[in-house]
C-alpha cells in the first residue's frame, strides 16, 4: 500500500490523475507540464502518460506557453474545449447571475436577471435558464452550484429573513422552473459539435465586460490586466440586474434536478457521468454528494422517459462559499485561520480553518451577522427579521446605509441608492459621510469582537465590505481598536479587501461542484471504466 491509500496500480493511476487535474484547476491552468511534474513529484514518463490519458478523456488540452526559449515549446495543460463544465449561480436578494465555469476557473457569464423578491420570482426563471444552458452544454455539465444569501438547512431548504423566505425548497423550485422552460431542438440544441458546449469567447454575457474571465490568480496585477472580480476598482463587480435532502456538505446541500428535453436519449445511452451512483467528497470543507440523483424522490429518475438529468444541484450559503473561494483563489490561500466577512444588504461571516469554511454541526453556519453585536444604546435591542434581537447585520450593509438617511430599505431593494451614498460620501456630502461612518463603526466593533474570540491571522472583506474598506479603511480600523483586548491590540490581524470582491460566492459555488468531480469516483463517472484514458 502506498502512502495515499492506493493498493493497486489502477488505484495509484486514478489517484495521480486526480492530483494532476486538481493542480491544474487550483493553479488556474497557468503552470507548465514541467512545473506540474516537479511540484507533484512525478516521473517525466508518468506525467506524460497521465496528460495523454486525460487529454484522450476530454479532461485536459495543452497549449504552448506564451513565451519559451529555443527548441520544443513548453506546454501548459488547461481545460479541454469539450471538457467538464460547472454551471454556477449567485442568487442575491434582488437579482441572480448564472455562469459556466471550466477547469482552472475560467468563467463565462451566461445570464443576469433581476427578480421580484419572491422565491418563485427568483428560482423559477433561474431553473429555466439552467435547463436552457444545460441543454446547450449537454453532457459536459458535471454539476450545478447555487449560492443563496441565507442559511441552508440540513434538508436543503433555505431561509432568507430579509425577504421573509422560510424553508424554501430551492431544488424543487429550480426543477419546476426547468420543467416550464422553452423546449430546445433535441438533436443539437445549439448547433454545436458533439460533446462541445458554447465557445467561451462567444457565449452571451453583459456587453460591458469580457465574455470570459480567468479568476484563478491571487495577484490582481496591473489595472488593465485584471480579470473581473479581481480589480481594485469598486465598479468592477459582477453585472447586477438592478444596476443591474441530501448530504451535509459544509454548508452545501446536494440534490438532483430533472430537465425536460425533447426526444431524450434512452437511459442506457446517457452520459457516463450522469450515473445513479452518488459521488461523495469532502475536500476543502465544502464537499458534495450525488452527481445526479442525491435527494431525488420517487424511484430511479433514469427510468423516466423524456427527461434529462443535469448532474446534482448543490445549494450553499453565499458567505461560506465566498470564504471557500477566498481560501482557494484569494487572500486566504495558505492561511491557517482566517475570518471572512461578506457584506451586501446585510452581513454574513465565516471562520475559515485550513482552507475549510466551518459550516457548523448542521451546515447552517456562516451567520456571524446574526450575533448579538448591535451597537450600544438605551432600551431593548431591536428585533431582527430572523427572530433574534440585536443582530450585528442590522447595522452593517446597504440596508443600514439607507436607514441612516431615512430612506426606504429592505426587501432586496436599494442597491443603487446605497452605492450612490458611498459615492456622495467620497465627494464630501455630510449626511452620506455620517451614514458611512456609522456603518463602518459597527463593522469595526464586530470585527474586534470576532478577533478577540477567534484570533485569526487575517480578516478579509468581500462585496460591499471591500467597498467600505476602500473608502474608509482608516476609520474602520480605528473604530475597532478600542474594542480589542490589549493583547490583540499589540499585533492586530490585517483587514484586507477580498481578492475576488463581488465574485466570491459565484466562484465558491463552482469550487464546491468541482470538489465532488475531482475525485477518482467523479472522474470514473465522466470517462467510464473502460475508456482508454482510464485503463490501467
Image (cartoon, rainbow, N blue to C red):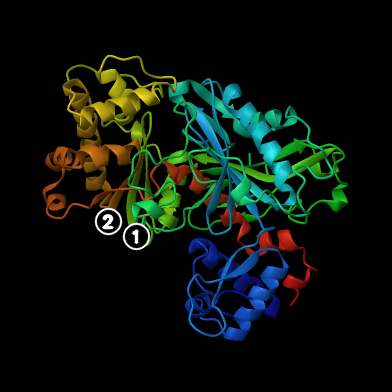
Q: Which residue is nearer to you in this view: 161 or 439?
A: 439
In three-dimensional space, the C-alpha distance between marks 2 and 1, rounded to whole angstroms, equals 7 Å
**Residue 12: % across, % down:** 64, 76
Residue lying at 63% horizontally and 57% vertically, measured from the top left: 517
- Which residue is at the far front? 70
The residue under the point 23% across, 41% down is 449
Front residue (pair 30, 530): 30
- Quarter of the image with the N terminus in it: bottom right
Q: Residues within 10 Å of mark 2 (few under 14, many from 20)?
A: some
The numbered dot on residue 336 is 1
Q: Nearer the viewer, residue 139 or 170?
A: 139
Residue that label 2 marks: 457
Say left or right for 201 vs 286. right
Q: Are marks 2 and 1 in contact (CB under 8 Å)?
A: yes
Callout 1 environment at 10 Å: few (<14), some (14 to 19), or many (20+)? some
Q: Find residue 69 and name its label.
A: none
Q: Is residue 479 left or right of residue 282?
A: left
Quarter location, residue 491: bottom left
Quarter-of-image position of residue 425 = top left
Q: Would you say residue 293 is visible in this rendering?
A: no
What x and y, as percent, mark residue 213? 50, 51
Q: Position of residue 98 (x, y in %)?
A: 57, 39
Q: Is residue 435 found left or right of 100 in the rendered image? A: left
Check the picture and name the quadrant holding the C terminus: bottom right
Say left or right for 289 vs 501. right
From the viewer's perspective, is residue 503 above or below residue 56?
Answer: above
- Determine the image quadrant of residue 464: top left
Task: Indicate the secondary structure of the residue bearing disc 1.
Answer: loop
Q: Residue at x 56, y 40 (%)?
A: 205
Instruction: Return the x and y of residue 118 as percentages of the image width and height.
Output: 55, 20
Q: Decide which of tag 2 and tag 1 comes sooner along the chain.
A: 1
Q: Is residue 264 visible?
A: yes
Amino acid at each position: 500500500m502506498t502512502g495515499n491509500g492506493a493498493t493497486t496500480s489502477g488505484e495509484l493511476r486514478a489517484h495521480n490523475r486526480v492530483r494532476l487535474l486538481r493542480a491544474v484547476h487550483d493553479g488556474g491552468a497557468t503552470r507548465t507540464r514541467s512545473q506540474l511534474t516537479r511540484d507533484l513529484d512525478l516521473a517525466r514518463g508518468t506525467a506524460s502518460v497521465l496528460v495523454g490519458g486525460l487529454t484522450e478523456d476530454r479532461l485536459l488540452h495543452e497549449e504552448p506557453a506564451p513565451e519559451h526559449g529555443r527548441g520544443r515549446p513548453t506546454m501548459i495543460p488547461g481545460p479541454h474545449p469539450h471538457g467538464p463544465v460547472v454551471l454556477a449561480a449567485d442568487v442575491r436578494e434582488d437579482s441572480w447571475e448564472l455562469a459556466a465555469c471550466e477547469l482552472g476557473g475560467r468563467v463565462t457569464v451566461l445570464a443576469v436577471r433581476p427578480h421580484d423578491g419572491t422565491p418563485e420570482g427568483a428560482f423559477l426563471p433561474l431553473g429555466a435558464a439552467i435547463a436552457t444552458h444545460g441543454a446547450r452544454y449537454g453532457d459536459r455539465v458535471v454539476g450545478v452550484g447555487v449560492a443563496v444569501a441565507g442559511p441552508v438547512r440540513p434538508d436543503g431548504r433555505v431561509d432568507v429573513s430579509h425577504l421573509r423566505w422560510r424553508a424554501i425548497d430551492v431544488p424543487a423550485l429550480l426543477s419546476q422552473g426547468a420543467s416550464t422552460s422553452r423546449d430546445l431542438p433535441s438533436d443539437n440544441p445549439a448547433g454545436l459539435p458533439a460533446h462541445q458546449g458554447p465557445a467561451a469567447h462567444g457565449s452571451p454575457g453583459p456587453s460591458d465586460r469580457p465574455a470570459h474571465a480567468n479568476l484563478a490568480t491571487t495577484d490582481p496585477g496591473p489595472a488593465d490586466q485584471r480579470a473581473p472580480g479581481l480589480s481594485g476598482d469598486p465598479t468592477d463587480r459582477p453585472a447586477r440586474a438592478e444596476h443591474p435532502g441530501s448530504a451535509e456538505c459544509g454548508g452545501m446541500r446536494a440534490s438532483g434536478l430533472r430537465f425536460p428535453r425533447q426526444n431524450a436519449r434512452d437511459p442506457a445511452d446517457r452520459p457516463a457521468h450522469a450515473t445513479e451512483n452518488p459521488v461523495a467528497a469532502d475536500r476543502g470543507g465544502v464537499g458534495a454528494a450525488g452527481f445526479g440523483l442525491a435527494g431525488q424522490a420517487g424511484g430511479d429518475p433514469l427510468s423516466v422517459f423524456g427527461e434529462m438529468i443535469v448532474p446534482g444541484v448543490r445549494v450553499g450559503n453565499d458567505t461560506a462559499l465566498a470564504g471557500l473561494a477566498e481560501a482557494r483563489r484569494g487572500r486566504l490561500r495558505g492561511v491557517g485561520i482566517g475570518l471572512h466577512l461578506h457584506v451586501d444588504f446585510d452581513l454574513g461571516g465565516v471562520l475559515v480553518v485550513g482552507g475549510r469554511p466551518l459550516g457548523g454541526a448542521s451546515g447552517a453556519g456562516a451567520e456571524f451577522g446574526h450575533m448579538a453585536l448591535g451597537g450600544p444604546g438605551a432600551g431593548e435591542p431591536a428585533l431582527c427579521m430572523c427572530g433574534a434581537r440585536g443582530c450585528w447585520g442590522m447595522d452593517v450593509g446597504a440596508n443600514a446605509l439607507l436607514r441612516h438617511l431615512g430612506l426606504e430599505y429592505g426587501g432586496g431593494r436599494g442597491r443603487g441608492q446605497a452605492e450612490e451614498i458611498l459615492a456622495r460620501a467620497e465627494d464630501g456630502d455630510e449626511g452620506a459621510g455620517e451614514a458611512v461612518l456609522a456603518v463602518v463603526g459597527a463593522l469595526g466593533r464586530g470585527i474586534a469582537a470576532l478577533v478577540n474570540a477567534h484570533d485569526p491571522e487575517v480578516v478579509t472583506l468581500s462585496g460591499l465590505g471591500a467597498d467600505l474598506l476602500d473608502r474608509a479603511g482608516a476609520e474602520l480600523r480605528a473604530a475597532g481598536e478600542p474594542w480589542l483586548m490589549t493583547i490583540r491590540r499589540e499585533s492586530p490581524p490585517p483587514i484586507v479587501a477580498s481578492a475576488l470582491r463581488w465574485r466570491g460566492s459565484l466562484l465558491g459555488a463552482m469550487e464546491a461542484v468541482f470538489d465532488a468531480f475531482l475525485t477518482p469516483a467523479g472522474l470514473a463517472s465522466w470517462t467510464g471504466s473502460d475508456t482508454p484514458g482510464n485503463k490501467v
